[in-house]
Amino acid sequence: MRAGPAGAARRAVADIGTADGFAVRLEAATAVYGTGAAAVTALHEVSAGVPRGAFTAMMGPSGSGKSTFLHLAAGLDRPASGRVLLGETDLSGLSETALTELRRTRIGFVFQAYNLIPALGVLDNITLPLRFARRPVDPAWLARITDAVGIDGLMGRRPGELSGGQQQRVAIARALVTRPDVVFADEPTGALDTGTGAQVLGLLRELVDSLGQTVVMVTHDPVAAAYAHFVMFLADGRIVDQLYAPTARSVAARMAGLGER
Ligand SMILES: Nc1ncnc2c1ncn2[C@@H]1O[C@H](COP(=O)(O)OP(=O)(O)OP(=O)(O)O)[C@@H](O)[C@H]1O
């Protein structure tokens, strides 16, 4: 019998070092910014797997390496040493062109600032990744995701005619349109009020539970992390803790243990 997402997360983390159950793996990945005396090591030989079909939150104090982890896992940056694998694909072996293609087709992004194109309507914003990837629109999938994110009635509008929460729903639909292996969300509710943020977080969780989508979210907020199945904690460029079935209280307690209140 297939394990549910939380079960998948538990099994997957126990299996770190094997491909089974992971959407993305970092193997002894080190990330360095700058060179010489100014070099900053942002990740120190990090080995970690992102469980497939689960919602993972990355937490840690400011400067702990959360964004760097996301950038490596999403193929936006390359590690100074070590490997990053998306499924069975070793990203270090790819040319820049192949990496760009992989990001277009196998990865979805959701940003704090939505990053929609103001001059394009909602439908064109959502389908833009397909145009970049020169792939056709699958009308059934498009209908399913626009229904799932609750923007059916907004397709004729432009981003400037939408609320922040609606814009983020459009951005989430855009992230899903290529049926990516993983959606990476960097502080997706950072620009939203608490109530709207809660709706967007509930939506991300629902997309994982109903579509089996793998989602990785970077956040500062224990309440946001509590929507995930699984939380990884970073401190000083290392994974120092993890938590299954988190609550805001249990996440805040772990963060306090890392020196953040
Ligand atoms: N472009 C850069 N050049 C130099 N150092 C950088 C650069 N980007 C990040 N760093 C450093 O790398 C370390 C990790 O940064 P990173 O942005 O990954 O942390 P973070 O946990 O996402 O932080 P925050 O929560 O504040 O966004 C920090 O010491 C940061 O100062």
Image (cartoon, rainbow, N blue to C red):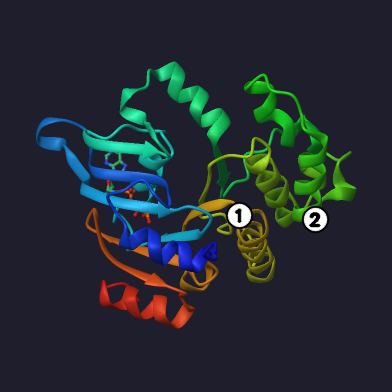
Q: What residue type is labelled 2?
A: Gly
Q: Is mark 1 within 8 Å of ligand 1?
A: no
Instruction: Judge whether residue 228 can be spotted in this image.
Output: yes
**Residue at label 2?**
150
Q: In which quarter of the image is residue 58?
A: bottom left
Mark 2 residue element: loop
Q: Nearer the viewer, residue 210 or 97?
A: 210
Q: Which residue is drawn at 39% across and 40% down?
A: 71
- Residue 73 is situated, as x and y percent measured from the top left of the image, at 39, 42
Q: Residue at x 49, y 28 (%)?
A: 102
Q: Nearer the viewer, residue 241 or 77?
A: 241
Mark 1 residue element: loop
- Residue 169 is situated, as x and y percent measured from the top left of the image, at 71, 51
Q: How far apart are marks 2 and 1 (CA)?
A: 18 Å
Q: How crowded is mark 2: few (under 14 residues within 10 Å), some or many (20 or more)?
A: some
Please identify, in this view, whether the residue under mark 2 or under mark 1 is nearer the observer.
1
Q: Which residue is drawn at 55% across and 42% down?
A: 109
Q: Residue at x 68, y 51 (%)?
A: 168
Q: Is residue 134 above or below residue 50?
A: above
Do the CB atoms of the residues marked 2 and 1 lie less than 8 Å apart? no
Q: Is mark 2 within 8 Å of ligand 1?
A: no
- Residue 40 is situated, as x and y percent measured from the top left of the image, at 19, 42
- Residue 121 is situated, as x and y percent measured from the top left of the image, at 81, 34
Q: In this view, does 59 lie above or below 161?
A: below
Question: Sequence-wise, which precedes: disc 2 or disc 1?
Answer: 2
Q: Is residue 123 above or below residue 231?
A: above
Q: Quadrant of the N terminus?
A: bottom right
**Residue at label 1?**
212
Return the mark for residue 19.
none
Q: Quadrant of residue 180?
A: top right
